[in-house]
């Protein structure tokens, strides 16, 4: 394949390793400076210019987009997608991973543990938010911080409130997060490629520091991931829309808690710690997928609003329990794309498979024939925190707007 590595740092360890791994495997590989592209929407088809000239044909790209060039970088990746060039990480996936709030918002509805987190804007909501995550000590995080900068441990509620208010007064967006004391300054980084963890390491903070970032003096050690940690890492990456990702997890008493999913994970630390050829695994994966660039289902299914994809839940007592997919659904012209049973996902299940209570099916078909199978809107659990007594409504909102 002909591979482009999108990076502003041709000499960086990760860029070099990807290039060399591709060349070693007989591929053609070039590092392309992300900021030298021109998004060309002037012709009949989406196109790209590079250094002022039309870009030659590429089969795949590996984006390594730094935080400071996110906007332009994502436009470039999106343009490659429109040109049907394969990328393991889509622009949407990279955007999802870019802020800590957005990523855990997306993960929170799935079977993925995350530290209890609150995000508020109004001063009056800061105190209930701190209590909502269990009270001090709490971790306060800048939404777009990296390398541990902007991650603060507040020992008591008063300090926490003061820190949040101070940061907010300088227009910074901050998360308030439960402090996972039992992880004792350690976290796990799992490098996901496709549907497996190809390498993992533990990072251990120095002294009484609670942040384990290598930039904060943390050291790395080898770790054997158990199945639950591997499953969570792979699933978190996939939910975010990333096929290559570094998933950071805290080791809590209730199992892995995902803190962050990184779309341009550095390779130096993990290759050094594990001695594994992670770059090679990424190149092999891209080569195996290159014929299947990401397809935006919503764009391509716009035949009619009468058809669509929906999730069907099989409840205890449903008439579908015990019926095969053919009997229960094929007759209604509903195609089952995946069957989710507990942590297991069965793609393209056979029509002879029987449905069980608790199954979740992702189906394609006429929305009308799925209507009575789609669960009623989920009722929300009782709030964890007692609501505060009603406050007087400020005059500007008193008309109910
Ligand atoms: P960054 O993206 O800047 O690295 P992280 O959210 O990953 O920020 O936090 C930095 C480090 O702080 C983590 O690697 C972890 O060691 C520690 N940490 C972060 N959140 C928590 C938490 N809720 N409980 C305990 N330790 C945490």
Image (cartoon, helix red, strand yellow):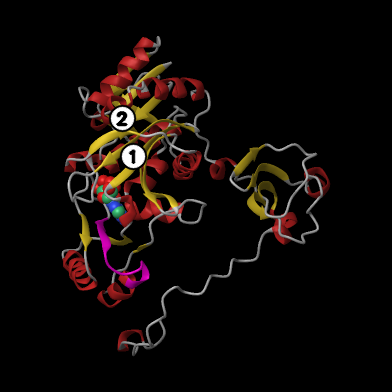
Q: Classify mark 1: residues with Cα within 10 Å, few (<14), some (14-19) or many (20+).
A: many
Where 384 falls versus 73 (above or below)?
below
Left or right side of 206 for 367: right
Q: Mark 2 points at which residue?
A: 270
| Residue 332 visible from this viewpoint | yes
Left or right side of 249 for 268: left
Q: Distance between the residues labelled 2 and 1?
A: 25 Å
* Kind of element beneath mark 2: helix
* Kind of element beneath mark 1: helix
Q: Earlier in the sequence, mark 2 or mark 1?
A: 1
Quadrant of the rendered structure where residue 401 is? Answer: bottom left
Q: Name the residue under label 1.
A: 74
x 39%, y 12%: residue? 27
x 44%, y 34%: residue? 243
Q: Which of 324 and 270 is in front in this view?
A: 270
Q: Where is residue 71 in the image (x, y as percent from the top left)?
A: 29, 43
Where 8 falls versus 187 (above or below)?
above
Q: Which of 10 and 58 is in front in this view?
A: 10
Label 1, ligand 1: CB separation under 8 Å: no
Report the quarter where the N terminus lies: top left
Q: Nearer the viewer, residue 135 or 39?
A: 135
Where 61 falls versus 242 (above or below)?
above
Quadrant of the rendered structure where residue 324 is? Answer: top right
Label 2, ligand 1: CB separation under 8 Å: no
Q: Classify mark 2: residues with Cα within 10 Å, few (<14), some (14-19) or many (20+).
A: many
Where 64 falls versus 153 (above or below)?
above
Left or right side of 119 for 171: left
x 53%, y 27%: residue? 292
Q: Does the magenta stretch include residue 137?
A: yes
Q: Position of residue 257 (x, y in %)?
A: 40, 51
Question: Which stretch did the figure color magenta?
Answer: 131-142
Q: Which of 173 and 164 is in front in this view?
A: 164
């Amino acid at each position: 394949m002909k591979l482009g590595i999108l990076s502003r740092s041709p000499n960086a360890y990760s860029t070099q390793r990807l290039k060399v791994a591709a060349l070693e495997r007989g591929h053609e590989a070039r590092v392309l400076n992300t900021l030298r592209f021109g998004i060309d929407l002037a012709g009949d088809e989406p196109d790209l210019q590079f250094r002022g000239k039309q870009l030659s044909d590429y089969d795949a790209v590996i984006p390594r987009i730094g935080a400071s060039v996110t906007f332009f970088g994502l436009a470039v990746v999106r343009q490659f997608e429109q040109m049907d060039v394969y990328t393991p990480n889509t622009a949407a996936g990279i955007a999802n991973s870019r802020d800590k709030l957005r990523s855990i918002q997306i993960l929170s509805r799935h079977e993925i543990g995350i530290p209890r987190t609150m995000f508020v804007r109004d001063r009056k909501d800061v105190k209930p938010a701190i209590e909502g995550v269990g009270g001090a000590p709490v971790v306060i995080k800048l939404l777009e911080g990296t390398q541990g900068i902007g991650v603060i441990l507040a020992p008591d509620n008063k300090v926490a409130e003061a820190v949040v208010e101070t940061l907010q007064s300088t227009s910074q967006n901050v998360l308030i997060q439960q402090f996972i004391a039992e992880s004792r300054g350690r976290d796990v980084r799992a490098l996901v490629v496709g549907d497996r963890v190809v390498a993992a390491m533990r990072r251990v903070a120095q002294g009484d520091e609670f942040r384990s970032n290598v930039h904060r003096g943390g050291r790395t050690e080898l770790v054997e991931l158990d199945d639950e940690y591997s499953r969570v890492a792979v699933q978190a990456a996939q939910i975010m829309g990333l096929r290559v990702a570094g998933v950071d997890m805290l080791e809590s008493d209730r199992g892995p808690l995902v803190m962050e999913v990184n779309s341009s994970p550095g390779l130096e630390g993990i290759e050094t710690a594990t001695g594994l050829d992670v770059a090679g695994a990424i190149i092999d994966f891209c080569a195996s997928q290159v014929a299947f660039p990401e397809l935006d289902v919503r764009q391509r299914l716009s035949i009619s609003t009468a058809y669509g994809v929906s999730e069907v839940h099989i409840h205890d007592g449903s008439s579908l329990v015990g019926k095969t997919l053919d009997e229960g659904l094929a007759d209604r012209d509903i195609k089952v794309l995946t069957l989710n049973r507990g942590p297991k996902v069965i793609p393209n299940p056979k029509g002879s498979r029987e449905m069980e209570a608790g199954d979740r099916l992702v189906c394609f078909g006429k929305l009308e024939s799925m209507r009575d199978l789609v669960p009623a809107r989920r009722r929300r659990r009782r709030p964890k925190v007692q609501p505060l007594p009603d406050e007087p409504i400020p005059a500007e909102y008193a008309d109910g707007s």
